[in-house]
Image: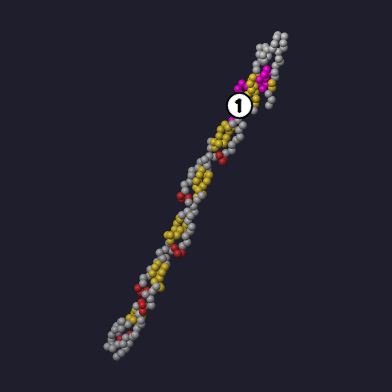
Amino acid sequence: QSTTGDECGGKYTECVCPTGVDEGPYGCAEYYPAPCNTVCKIAYSDNCHIRPDNTGSYGCQKYWDDCKSKCEVPYEDYCRNRTAVSTPYGCQTYWSDCSTKCQVAYPDNCRNRTAASCTYGCQSSWGDCSSKCQTCYSDNCRNRTAVSCTYGCQSYFSDCTSKCQTCKSCDYSTQCPGYEATSCVYGIKSTCSACGIKKYKCKPLTSSGSSGTGGGGGGGHGRGPDTITSRF
């Protein structure tokens, strides 16, 4: 008795196997039962049955050519979807899923700058770190006003030695000791000017009653006294 291979199953002595399908490049997925177990019933439509799926956390970069549903080469990171920020002063933090691209940049270079310690204030800050001082004022002259002195400077500011803080006062008796006359009857011996004042030492009256030398004979008359008055 002849029958189909599906019904045969080894029960009959005469069995005609079905033609089956071409296994194609990917092999047979299912064979007919014995004695027709060499005849392919269902062929593989792709090679997925022997391909591992390498899909990772970051997606698939390339699928198998003979199995489009399984990943051959996975992405190792998420860099394709990350944008790197500009980092003129270096990178502060990188993307956790893309270690080659910067997520947050340093806004300045302060981490590499040392601030100068200033007594009189900061003259200039670092160009790449405005919160830290680069050079200090050497004194406090910018905040000091010098007084104008007629008789010289008595003292300078302690924090600005080029500007006068207090002026010298003028004491005429110290500058011109012994000069007390403002006019002389018998002539001026010497003059001293200080503190805007001019005074004299006068010539004394001689025993002959004259400040000068004596005249001729006894009958002569001596010269009268000279009066000199200072004007201011």
| Furthest-top residue in this view | 218
Q: Which residues are magenta?
A: 168-188
Nearest the camera: 153 or 204? 204
Work out whether residue 7 can be spotted.
no
Q: Quadrant of the C terminus?
A: top right
Instruction: Between residue 131 and residue 206, name the one nearer to us.
Output: 206
Element type where label 1 sits in the image:
loop
The spot of residue 138 in percent (x, y) is: 52, 40
Q: How is the image coloured?
A: secondary structure
What residue lies at 35% left-to-right and 73% top-to-bottom?
Answer: 50
* Residue at numbered disc 1: 171
The quarter of the displayed image where residue 17 is located: bottom left
**Main secondary structure type of the part rendered in magenta:** loop
Q: Residue at x 65, y 17 (%)?
A: 203
Pick out the residue farthest to the front. Answer: 216
With respect to residue 227, does 12 lie above or below? below
Q: Which residue is rendered at x = 36% and y = 70% of the image?
A: 52
Q: Residue 224: image x %, image y %?
A: 71, 15
Q: Between residues 102 and 96, which one lies in front from this camera angle?
A: 102
Q: In screen coordinates, is 104 left or right of 155?
A: left
Check residue 184 for magenta coloring. yes
User: Residue 211 appears at what percent x and percent y?
Assistant: 67, 15
Q: Would residue 153 be seen by someone viewing this image from the given angle?
A: yes
| Drawn side of residue 44 relative to residue 211, left or right | left
Answer above or below: position of 38 versus 2.
above
Q: Quadrant of residue 42?
A: bottom left
